[in-house]
C-alpha cells in the first residue's frame, strides 16, 4: 500500500508525512510505503492515496496555497480525486485544496492574528468517511496545529450544506483560530478528499506525545484495503 | 500601459488585521477613524503595443483567476498610460 507525498517548493512537513506512513503505519501486519511526488510531476503514479503536506508552498506568496494550485502535479491529483482516489490535505495542503476548488470555503488569518502552534483536542464530526472510520464515536484526539492562516471561512449556505451532508470531518473542542462552527477539517461531496488544519502525521508515535493521528491514516489504509484486495 | 489591481476582502469576511490597525490608530489619537479594511494593491506593467481592450480582458482574467480568491475577496482595477 503506497502513499504519495507531494513535495512543493516550501513544503516542510513532507518528511514528517513520509516518516509517519513508512515507519508508523502498518496494515494487516505489513508496513505501508511512502514515496515523494515532486510538484512538477504530471502523474501520481501507482499511489493508492495522496498526501498534500503542510508547509509554506511557494512561500505562501499571494495567498496560502494560491501558487501551489497551479503546479502540474495538482492536475494529476485532481484527476486522481475525480476517479475516487483518497486525497488528504494537511495544513498548507488543506489551503491548496480549497484554492484548487476540490474543497469549499477558504482559510483566512487566525482570528487572534497569532501563529498558533500547540496540541489541540479534536472530535471527529462523522465516522462515515475513509479518513475517520477507525475513530470511535465520542473519542477525543490530541493532535498538533501549527498555522497562521487556519481560520476556516465559508458563507452560511456552504456551512449549512457541509453540516447537512455530514461533511465536517473534525471539529475543535476549544477553537484556537476562530474557524466558523469550530471546523478543523472537511470532506468533499464524494467523501474521498479531506482537508484538515491539524497535523495527524505529527501524532503517530509515543515519542511525539500522541499517537492519535494514526487513526486517520489507519482509516485510509482500511478504505484502500477493502477497495483493492492486497496481493500477497 | 499600467494596471493597478485593488484586492479587498468581501464585506462579509472578518478582517482582524484591519481591526487591529483601527484600534492602534484610535489609540494613537486618530479619533476620526471608525473602520479599517486591509487589502492588496498590484501594480502591473504591460508590454508596449498592447491594446486597451486586450489589457482590460487580460487583467480582468488574471485578477479573477489568480490574484483573488473569489470565496473571500473581490477586486477592481484601473488602467493608465
Image (cartoon, coloured by chain):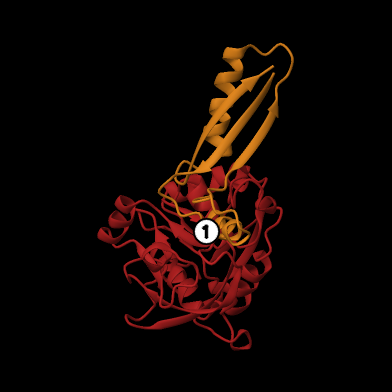
Chain colours: A red, B orange
The residue furthest right is B48
Which percent across, then down, holds residue A45? 59, 51
Seen in the picture, residue A121 relative to A92 is either above or below; the reply is: below
Q: Position of residue A160 (x, y in %)?
A: 28, 56
Q: Please tell me whether residue B20 is drawn above or below residue A208 in the rendered image.
A: above
In the figure, B56 relative to A159: above or below?
above
Identify the residue shown where x is 65% and y is 52%.
A60
Foreground pick, A213 / B75: B75
Residue B17: where, in percent of width, then height? 57, 56
Q: Is residue A140 left or right of residue A49?
A: left
Q: Give the quarter of the image for residue A222.
A: bottom left
Number of numbered discs overlaid on the protein picture = 1
**Is disc 1 surrounded by few (<14), some (14 to 19) or many (20+) residues within 10 Å?**
some
Residue A8 appears in view: no
| Residue at image point 56% right, 32% down | B63
SS under mark 1: helix
* A161 sits left or right of A223 in the view: left
The quarter holding residue A123 reads: bottom left
Check disc 1 and report the residue beneath it: B16
Of residues A161 and A9, the one drawn nearer to the viewer in this rendering = A161
Residue at the left extreme, as displayed: A164
The subunit carrying tag 1 is: B
Q: Quadrant of residue A163?
A: bottom left
Q: Does residue B31 appear anywhere in the picture?
A: yes
Image coordinates of residue A64 in percent, x first then y, are 59, 52
Q: Nearer the viewer, residue A229 or A126?
A: A126
Residue at (58% x, 30% y) in the render = B62
Amino acid at each position: 500500500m503506497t502513499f504519495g507525498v507531494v513535495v512543493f517548493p516550501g513544503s516542510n512537513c513532507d518528511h514528517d508525512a513520509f516518516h509517519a506512513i513508512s515507519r508508523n503505519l502498518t496494515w494487516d501486519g505489513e508496513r505501508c510505503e511512502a514515496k515523494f511526488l515532486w510538484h512538477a510531476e504530471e502523474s501520481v503514479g501507482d499511489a493508492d492515496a495522496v498526501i498534500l503536506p503542510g508547509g509554506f508552498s511557494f512561500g505562501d506568496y499571494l495567498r496560502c496555497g494560491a501558487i501551489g494550485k497551479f503546479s502540474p502535479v495538482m492536475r494529476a491529483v485532481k484527476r486522481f480525486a475525480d476517479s475516487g482516489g483518497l486525497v488528504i490535505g494537511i495544513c498548507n495542503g488543506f489551503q491548496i485544496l480549497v484554492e484548487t476548488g476540490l474543497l469549499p470555503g477558504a482559510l483566512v488569518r487566525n482570528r487572534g492574528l497569532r501563529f498558533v502552534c500547540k496540541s489541540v483536542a479534536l472530535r471527529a464530526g462523522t465516522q462515515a468517511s475513509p479518513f475517520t472510520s477507525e475513530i470511535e464515536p465520542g473519542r477525543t484526539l490530541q493532535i498538533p496545529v501549527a498555522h497562521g492562516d487556519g481560520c476556516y471561512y465559508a458563507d452560511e449556505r456552504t456551512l449549512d450544506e457541509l453540516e447537512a451532508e455530514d461533511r465536517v470531518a473534525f471539529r475543535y473542542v476549544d477553537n484556537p483560530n476562530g474557524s466558523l462552527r469550530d471546523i478543523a477539517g472537511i470532506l468533499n461531496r464524494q467523501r474521498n478528499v479531506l482537508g484538515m488544519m491539524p497535523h495527524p502525521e505529527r501524532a503517530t508515535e509515543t515519542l511525539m506525545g500522541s499517537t492519535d493521528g494514526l487513526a486517520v491514516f489507519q482509516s485510509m489504509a482500511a478504505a484502500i484495503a477493502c477497495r483493492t484486495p492486497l496481493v500477497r | 500601459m499600467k494596471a493597478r489591481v485593488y484586492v479587498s476582502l468581501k464585506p462579509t469576511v472578518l478582517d482582524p488585521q484591519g481591526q487591529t490597525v483601527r484600534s492602534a490608530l484610535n489609540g494613537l489619537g486618530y479619533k476620526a477613524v471608525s473602520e479599517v479594511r486591509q487589502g492588496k494593491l498590484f501594480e502591473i506593467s504591460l508590454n508596449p503595443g498592447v491594446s486597451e481592450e486586450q489589457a482590460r480582458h487580460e487583467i480582468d482574467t488574471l485578477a479573477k483567476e489568480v490574484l483573488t480568491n473569489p470565496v473571500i475577496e473581490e477586486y477592481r482595477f484601473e488602467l493608465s498610460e
